[in-house]
Image (cartoon, helix red, strand yellow):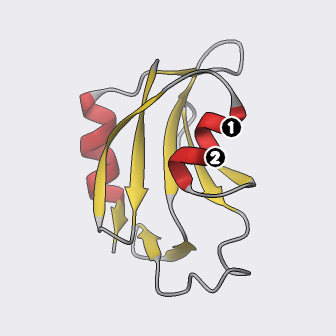
Amino acid sequence: MTQLILIDPTTKTIEFVERKDKTLKSLYELADCEYFESMRITPSLVLLIDEEAKLRNKQQEQFMIDNQIAILGKGILCRDGNEGDNIDVTDADLEYAKQLFTF
């Protein structure tokens, strides 16, 4: 299992979650979506966001990146591995996420 960070605007939480396996489906289940768009936050951190949130009227479910960019739906913050796979995020990554993302 891989530890990731879930940004959930519905519950207004930013917390660790466990990915149950390495399938794309397990990421979709964490974010309650079917398609992701990825956004590189740092050289090693990638934010996966629900590509269809706007189409499903999720405007009330949003979070902000650095108080400048509004993101609809849930987000998953991942750490890139050397092979393009996800590796565990760290406590420092969680603290960084809590400073970067707001509701």
Residue at 47 percent of width and 78 percent of height:
61
Dot 2, how many residues are within 10 Å of its Cα: few (below 14), some (14-19), or many (20+)? some
Residue at 65 percent of width and 12 percent of height:
82
Tell me which corner region of the image, top left, top right, bottom left or bottom right, holds residue 21. top right
Which residue is label 1 attached to?
A: 25
The residue lying toward the viewer, choosing from 100 and 23, is 23
**Residue type at the position of mark 2:** Tyr
The residue lying toward the viewer, choosing from 60 and 94, is 60
Q: Identify the secondary structure beneath mark 2.
A: helix
Image quadrant in which the C terminus is located: bottom left
x%, y% of residue 10? Answer: 37, 72
x%, y% of residue 2? Answer: 46, 21
Gap between marks 2 and 1 measured at Cα: 5 Å
- 93 vs 61, left or right, is left
Q: Is 40 situated above or below 20? A: below
Q: Is 14 situated above or below 72? A: above
Numbered label attached to residue 42: none
- 90 vs 33, left or right, is left
x%, y% of residue 8? Answer: 39, 61
Residue at 68 percent of width and 27 percent of height:
23
**Residue type at the position of mark 1:** Lys
Dot 1, how many residues are within 10 Å of its Cα: few (below 14), some (14-19), or many (20+)? some
Residue furthest toward the top? 82
Which residue is label 2 attached to?
A: 28
x%, y% of residue 52? Answer: 73, 69
Tell me which corner region of the image, top left, top right, bottom left or bottom right, holds residue 65. bottom left
